[in-house]
Image (cartoon, helix red, strand yellow):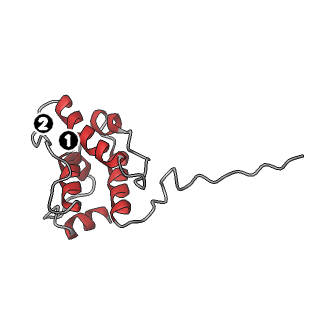
Amino acid sequence: KILAWLKEIQLIQRTVQPQLFPRYCRNGVLFADLLNKLGGRTPVIKGIIRTPDSTTAINANFDKILGYLRDFPRFSSRYLWSQVKIVGEGDENVIWGLLDDIWYWKHNKTSPYDPAANVFPTTQKKQ
């Protein structure tokens, strides 16, 4: 679903193997390009280091990306604080999950995996 959407909005041009795709996302450039494309004519993420040569540069990219997304109350909090898992560990599930959260947010839907959406008040019986 995510790869088809990225092709549809012309962020990626060719078919990418799903198992290789998370590697392209680890430096933050694709996330920044995606958010800028979704943001319209004016870039919403500025100052991205397009060819980061260190972990510090990659972290700077993700600081901007995740900081931007944290400003939206309706955005799922599931991976907003997972920078170490993305940058340090390259956790593919987190990368796919963040892309999925962006898809739900862009389509004005609530992710079924959003922790805030799955909190149900508990009722306790008084004795």
Q: Amino acid at mark 1?
A: Asn
Is disc 2 surrounded by few (<14), some (14 to 19) or many (20+) residues within 10 Å?
A: some
103, above or below 30, in the image: below
Q: Which residue is mark 1?
A: 27
Q: Secondary structure at mark 1?
A: loop
The N terminus: image quadrant: bottom left
109 versus 27 height, above or below: below
In-front residue for pair 124/50? 124
Q: Secondary structure at mark 2?
A: loop
Check the image and report above or below for 32 versus 54.
Answer: below
One can see residue 20 in this view: no
Residue 14 can be seen in this image: yes
Residue at the disc numbered 2:
52
Near-viewer residue (110 or 17): 110
Residue 127 location in percent, x, y? Answer: 90, 46
Badge 1: residue crowd in 10 Å (few <14, some 14–19, many ≥20): many
Q: Residue at x 32, y 37 (%)?
A: 83
* Relative side of 7 to 95, left or right: left
| Image location (x, y in percent) of residue 76 | 42, 52
Mark 2 and mark 1 residues within 8 Å of each other at the beta carbon? yes
